[in-house]
Amino acid sequence: MSEIFSPFKSKQKLIEIGICVLIFIGMAVPFKVMVLIKGFTEVRPVNIMPVVAGLLLGPAGAWGCAIGNLIADLFGTFSKASILGFIGNFFAAYLPYKLWHIKGRRETPNVKSNKNLLKYCLVSLGSAITTALFIACGLDILFNMWIPQVFWIVFLNDLGFPLVLGLPVLIVLTSEDSNLQITLPEKESSIQALAKKSLFSLKSILLWMLLISEVLLFVMITLGMRMTANVLTIIIGGVFVISLFSFMIID
């Protein structure tokens, strides 16, 4: 969990958070007029931000997107549900970073090979479905508001824009001409590396739990079921939330 809050201990990372916030607001606010569901969501080209910012800036990019989304909500979609948007956008950026570096190889994010291009598409898909499930099902559980359209709109926004617009942005920012300082996980001592190997098994288990629960919830939503429909969906939802938060906080 220390990695999540590490940006607040560095002046450079605080600057990166501020820059992400400003870019996010600048991209989000002009499209607030293109409402899809009043008070909840709109057409969001800004959704290229979380995956790209998360991959390149790590936790700082995640905090920047979360704070930026919360401030942008003040321009037309702010409500009690905005806390879900805050957390959801943090996940949308931090999850790609965690997935990219799950094996601890400290590889700079790039799409210079077919393997890495596929990896980028997969982390974008994982980010999109996780964020959509968290927000849509969170509305149901916390506020008794089941709006299936929210799931599909968030999912398509969070998947489509990173693939269509985010990909060329990532290519430019990871090119040899770019001066961007990309964030990688901290180097580990031999003792830390040994400990990480044992944690890798736990992270793998949590990731599989997360993936399976997401697939089941995705199928249920596709069939028209809601999160609080019955005990089974509630249990699966609980597995989804526990595995997601646990996977996020393990450094």
Image (tube, rainbow, N blue to C red):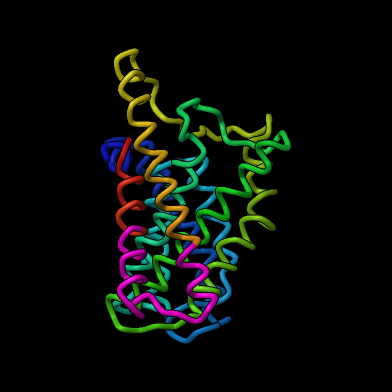
Q: In x, y percent, where is residue 83?
A: 31, 68
Left or right, 127 with respect to 141, comes to right
* Span highlighted in magenta in the image: 216-239
Q: Residue at x 30, y 23 (%)?
A: 195
Q: Which residue is painted at 46% across and 31% down in the image?
A: 184
Q: Quadrant of the C terminus?
A: top left
* Magenta span contains residue 220: yes
Instruction: Describe residue 83's horizontal placement relative to residue 184 as left or right.
Output: left
* Vertical position of residue 89 compared to residue 36: above or below: above
Would you identify the image quadrant in which residue 81 lies? bottom left
Please name whichever residue, 119 or 82, is drawn nearer the observer in this view of the structure.
Answer: 119
250 drawn magenta: no
Relative vertical location of residue 91 with respect to residue 178 in this rendering, above or below: below
Q: Is residue 22 above or below residue 235?
A: above
Give coordinates of residue 222: x percent, y percent.
54, 75
Q: Residue at x 46, y 60 (%)?
A: 214
Report the predominant secondary structure element of the magenta stretch.
helix
